[in-house]
Image (cartoon, rainbow, N blue to C red):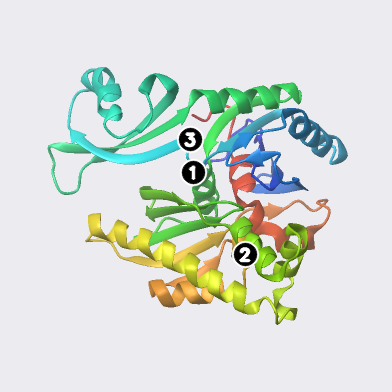
Amino acid sequence: MMMGRKPPLVGIDIGNRAIKIAEAGESKKQYQLKGFAIADLAPGLIDNGAIIDRDAVVAIIRDLFKQNKIKNRNVALSIGGYSVIVKRITIETMSDADFLANIHAEAEQYIPFDISEVNLDYQIVGENQNNPDQMDVLLVAAKKEMIAEYIEILRTAKLNPCVIDVEAFALQNLFEYNFEPTDDCVVLIDIGASKTSINVLDGPDSLFMRDISIGCFHLDETIADQLECTMAEAESRRLKNSQDDEIRPIIDTAASDWCGEINQVINHFYSSHRSHQISRAILSGGGAFVQPFSHKLALDLSVDVTTMDPFVNLALHPKCNDADRIRQLAPQLAIAMGLTLRKLDDK
C-alpha cells in the first residue's frame, strides 16, 4: 500500500453489540494507530444491522469522539449483513462501453433485491482463468435504505462520511497492509455478535464471500438458557470460561457447531474452485477469543489457524494510551483498523 499525503480516515465499525472506532496517523515509514474507542451496546439498539434507536446510537458515537478527543471528523464506515450482497461473477468479455450498458442487467441475475432498491458497485477482476473469452467481475450491492440510514446517523453525530466500505473488504485491507500477498489461499473469518463473515483470498483477489448466522450472541443465548442466567451474566462467564467448569461443555458444543457451519461453507467454495486449496485461516472478531474454537477449526479444515495480528506493519503511536489493552482487543478491532487505513479519495 502506498503512503499518501491525505490523512487517514477515522474508522467506525457499528456492530449489533458494540461500536468500535480506530484512528490512525502517518509517520514517514508507516501508519500508526493513534487511538481507539469501544462502547458496548445494550440489546435492542441495533438488530441485524438495522438501527432501532437512532438517538441512542448517535449519542454513543458523539460521546466516543468527545471522550477520546478525536478531532478528525472524516470517517469511513463499514456495512455488512444480509442487506449487502458481494458476488464474483463471470461474463463474456466486452468493451467498457458495452459493460457499462449491460452491468445492471447482468447484476439482476445474481442480486435477490429489486435493482432499483440497491446501490451497485463493481470491479473488473480480469480475464477468467478457465476461459480467455470471459472476464471475472466482483459485484457489490447494498440496499439504499440501509446506506441512507447510516449516513444520516453519522451526519447527525456531526461527522463527515467519506467512504462506505464492506466489512469483509475492510478486514482484507488490514490483512493486505500487514502481510505481503503470497500464492497461497487464505480464508479470513470474522466472528461477530450475530454473524460470521468468510472471505477466501487468492493473493490480493477475493474469490468467495459468505455470511452465516452464527456468532457470540447465539452462544450467550445458549449459556443463558441452560444455566438460567441473564445475557449479561452469560457473556461475562463466556469471557472467563477457562475458570468456569460449568460452561465449558456448552462452549465446546457451540464451537463444534460453528466449525461445522464454516466447514460447509468451505466445502461449497471447493465445489466451485477445485484448483484451489486453503492453506491457513485467520480469525478476527469477538469469536476469535472463544478458546476451543481455533483448535477445533484447525482440525476440521486441516489448515493452520491463527488470530489476526494488525501490528505486523501497523505500529502503535508512542503516545497511544492503553497499548496493552489495544493489543489484547486487536482481533475485535480489526474491521475498524482496516477502515482507518482508507483515504479521502478511496472508492
Earlier sequence position, callout 1 versus callout 2: 1
Q: Which callout, 3 or 1, points to the residue nearer the camera?
A: 3
Which residue was labeled with disc 2?
222
Disc on res. 83: 3
* Local SS, label 2: helix
- Which amino acid is tagged 3? Ser
The answer to whether residue 120 is above or below residue 110 is above
User: Could you give the CA–CA distance between mark 3 and mark 1, rounded to whole angstroms?
Assistant: 15 Å
| Image position of 85 (left or right of 149) | left
User: Horizontal and vertical percent for residue 198?
Assistant: 45, 54
- Which amino acid is tagged 1? Phe
Viewer-proximal residue, 224 or 138? 224
User: Horizontal and vertical percent for residue 180?
Assistant: 46, 56
User: Could you give the CA–CA distance between mark 1 and mark 2, rounded to whole angstroms?
Assistant: 31 Å
* Local SS, label 3: loop
| Image position of 70 (left or right of 15) | right
User: Horizontal and vertical percent for residue 110?
Assistant: 30, 35
Question: Does the image show residue 29?
Answer: no
